[in-house]
Image: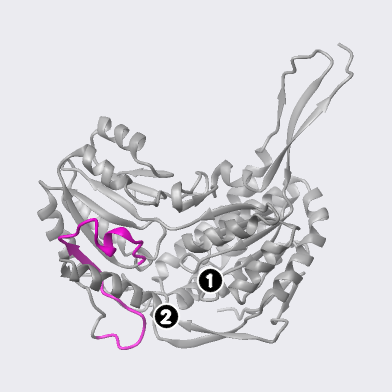
């Protein structure tokens, strides 16, 4: 495995924090230190913005084909090293190795897809009501983009905004989670190796508050792309008002799953567990509230309980592992508190609900199935972000749609049915940014990803994701002789 340098990248230089600060990076499966990473503050953010602002004029003037060539080379660099990159990501976030491998492959796909899409991002000519006037619309990059990312998908969360912003002609300052900084540094390494000019991509690591404030207070930062909690998203919205900075926010979720009696219960049970424990439930689009038709609810509970019992818990570096650790002790304690409070209100644990006895080290929590759930319980109302599967029986279609919509969140909703008429009713009436019918992975580079209500604003991926980093400019030509 190659030895990589895990430092900040500012203006083409791999550097320590300006204040000399460091961060002990912990493997969540062992609770052992796996690296010491620079940990700065607002000074690093300001230096990175300086570099991005200085690099912007030249990068924005490059053709779409020139920018695309860099992204394509970066994608190739990732694919040549995907196995070793995946191992590094698993060490810092805990997810099973096969999931990290898939995430890096998706990172390469994102670089590649936006490299191709930007070549075909056309303006338009508008027919004028006057014979002596011509009107057209062109799209130009916004300027400096700040990216603030969460730890749960330390490659995907970052690559989807970086790829779009860079393809559009923006320059970028990335601030990954301090729990998973190495993945971001390697994503930037791919771009450096691909020949990206100094200052076009910058990566910092440090205090989230002072670095976030540095972004918000600098009028040169024209867009902040954020993945994280609704609470922090609201703070960014307040702060962005000072400079009228554009935002794209992917925030919390509380995804309903509507399972109807015309499905193969065994198949849906297996898919439900596999999706629920992906990244140990630490997924913004993780299915959470399982509404199962009363005619199959007992069978479904029996099957998911049996399947959950058979899952193997352990280090993500072990290829036999199905479920890795949660990211840190605080996250595990939060999941435990949600389950405990719900049990006190009458919920019933059918399996799991505790730490595994055989793993003394690491932030592990057993895959958990819970019955007797009602809408007053924390496990129902709050985003779990853990391997917990609550089941709620239902009998009426309109009632379950109402229950599914009765939340402040609106990222994704899932449904399992083979009834076409019912499917149409569901995707039309469910109040979510994405609807997944007989599908468990509502994410791909070519389609827009994002939510409504408290789940965020804006979109990543797809044509819409590229538009987030482009400003339409209307051009009028007058005095043209007819």
Q: Position of residue 40 (x, y in %)?
A: 66, 79
* Identity of the residue drawn at 30% across and 37% down: 426
Up/down of 355 relative to 457, above or below? below
Locate residue 442 relative to residue 175 in the image: left or right: left
Q: Residue at x 41, y 71 (%)?
A: 97
For the point 57% across and 42% down, the residue is: 464
Q: Please tell me in which quadrant of the rendered image residue 419 appears.
A: top left
Pick the residue in front: 112 or 201: 201
Decide whether residue 393 is among the magenta residues.
no
Residue 65's disc is: none
Reply yes or no: does residue 371 show up in magenta: yes
Judging from the image, what secondary structure is the residue with disc 1 in?
helix
- Judge whether 187 appears above or below 298 on screen: below
Image quarter hosting the C terminus: top right
In this image, 320 relative to 54: left or right?
A: left
**Circle 1 residue:** 85
Magenta span: 358-385
- Of helix, strand and loop, which one carries label 2? loop
């Amino acid at each position: 495995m190659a030895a990589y340098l895990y430092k900040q990248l500012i203006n083409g230089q791999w550097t320590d924090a300006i204040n000399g600060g460091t961060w002990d990076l912990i493997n969540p499966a062992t609770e052992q230190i796996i690296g010491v990473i620079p940990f700065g503050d607002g000074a690093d953010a300001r230096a990175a913005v300086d570099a991005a602002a200085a690099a912007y004029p030249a990068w924005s003037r490059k053709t779409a084909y020139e920018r695309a060539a860099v992204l394509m080379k970066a994608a190739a660099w990732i694919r040549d090293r995907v196995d070793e990159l995946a191992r590094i990501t698993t060490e810092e976030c805990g997810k099973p190795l096969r999931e990290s491998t898939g995430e890096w492959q998706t990172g390469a796909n994102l670089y590649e897809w936006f490299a191709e899409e930007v070549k075909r991002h056309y303006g338009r000519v508008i027919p004028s009501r006057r014979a002596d006037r011509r009107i057209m619309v062109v799209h130009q990059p916004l300027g400096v983009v700040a990216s603030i990312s969460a730890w749960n998908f330390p490659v995907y969360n970052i690559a989807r905004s970086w790829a779009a912003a860079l393809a559009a002609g923006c320059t970028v300052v990335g601030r990954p989670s301090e729990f998973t900084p190495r993945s971001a540094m390697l994503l930037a390494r791919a771009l450096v190796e691909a020949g990206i000019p100094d200052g076009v991509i910058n990566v910092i690591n440090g205090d989230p508050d002072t670095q976030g404030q540095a972004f918000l207070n600098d009028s040169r930062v024209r867009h902040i792309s954020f993945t994280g909690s609704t609470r922090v998203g609201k703070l960014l919205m307040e702060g962005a008002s000072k400079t009228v900075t554009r935002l794209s926010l992917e925030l919390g979720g509380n995804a309903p799953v509507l399972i109807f009696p015309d499905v193969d219960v065994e198949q849906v049970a297996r898919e439900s567990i596999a999706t629920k424990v992906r990244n140990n439930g630490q997924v913004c689009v993780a299915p959470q509230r399982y509404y199962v038709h009363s005619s199959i609810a007992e069978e479904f509970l029996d099957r998911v309980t049996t399947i959950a019992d058979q899952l193997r818990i352990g280090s993500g570096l072990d290829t036999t592992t199905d479920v890795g650790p949660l990211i840190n002790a605080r996250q595990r304690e939060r999941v435990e508190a949600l389950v405990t409070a719900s049990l006190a209100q009458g919920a019933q644990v059918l399996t799991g609900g505790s730490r595994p006895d055989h793993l003394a080290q690491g932030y592990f929590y057993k895959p958990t199935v819970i019955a007797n759930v009602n809408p007053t319980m924390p496990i129902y109302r709050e985003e779990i972000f853990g391997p917990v599967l609550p089941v709620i029986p239902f009998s009426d279609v309109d009632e379950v749609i109402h229950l599914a919509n009765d939340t402040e969140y609106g990222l994704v909703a899932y449904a399992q049915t083979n009834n076409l008429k019912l499917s149409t009713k569901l995707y039309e009436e469910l109040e979510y940014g994405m609807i997944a019918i007989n599908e468990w992975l509502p994410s791909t580079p070519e389609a827009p990803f994002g939510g409504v209500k408290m789940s965020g604003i804006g979109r990543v991926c797809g044509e819409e994701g590229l538009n987030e980093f482009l400003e339409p400019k209307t051009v009028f030509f007058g005095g043209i002789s007819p």
